[in-house]
Image: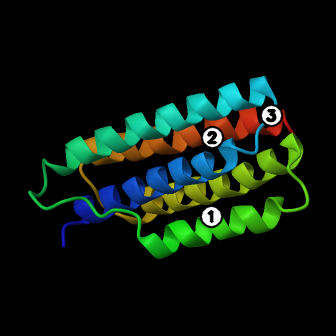
Amino acid sequence: MDNNIDILDELHKGACMGIDALNFIFSKVKEEKFKKLLENQKSEYENLAERINKLYRDYTTKDIHETGTMAKIMTWYGIQKDTMMNTSVSNLADLLIRGTNMGIIEGKKIINHKTMDKKVHKLCTEYIMMQEKYLDRLKEFL
């Protein structure tokens, strides 16, 4: 399979997992400033997922791989477990920081170890930069 397709699948999976995590956490958020940050982050993930999906069409007519049900369940379960006793903004920010860090790490591994077209590389770089931006913003809530 084409490296570009694999990379776009991975980026899409990461964006969708970010959207899922934000959706699962959103109902637990009471503070408006934090809620607004999460809304903005979710919007950027959604925009990125759309752009990834569009670029995917340049490489194949097949559907982009969606996040599996098991991955969604595991994300939901992890969030429920980690917030059962503590729904403070600091704890929620900590959870999101850990997930965002995982996305950055995966993006960096892709950039450092895979060969890809310039358009895919640019999108991968934007994916990493977007997550780094929110990582810094989330730290304010620790």
Residue furthest left as drawn? 61
Is residue 62 something that shows in the picture? yes
Is residue 118 something that shows in the picture? no
Determine whether, in the image, residue 33 is placed left or right of residue 9. right
Q: How many marks?
A: 3
Q: Nearer the viewer, mark 1 or mark 2?
A: 1
Q: Which element carries disc 1, helix, strand or loop? A: helix
Upstream in the sequence, badge 2 or badge 3? 3
Q: Which element carries disc 2, helix, strand or loop? A: helix
Q: Which element carries disc 3, helix, strand or loop? A: loop
Residue identifier under label 2: 132
Q: Residue at the spot x=49%, y=76% of the render?
A: 70
- Classify mark 1: residues with Cα within 10 Å, few (<14), some (14-19) or many (20+): some
Residue 103 screen position, x and y as percent: 56, 56
Q: Residue at the spot x=62%, y=64% of the render?
A: 76
Separation of disc 2 and disc 3 at Cα?
A: 24 Å
Type of amino acid under label 2: Glu
Q: Residue at the spot x=61%, y=46% of the render?
A: 22
Residue identifier under label 1: 76
Q: Nearer the viewer, mark 2 or mark 3?
A: 3
Q: Residue at the spot x=58%, y=47% of the render?
A: 23
Image quarter of residue 37: top right
Residue 92 screen position, x and y as percent: 79, 48
Relative to the observer, which residue lies in front, 23 or 56?
23
Upstream in the sequence, badge 1 or badge 3? 3
Determine whether, in the image, residue 119 is placed left or right of residue 86. left
Type of amino acid under label 1: Trp
Residue 30 circle label? 3
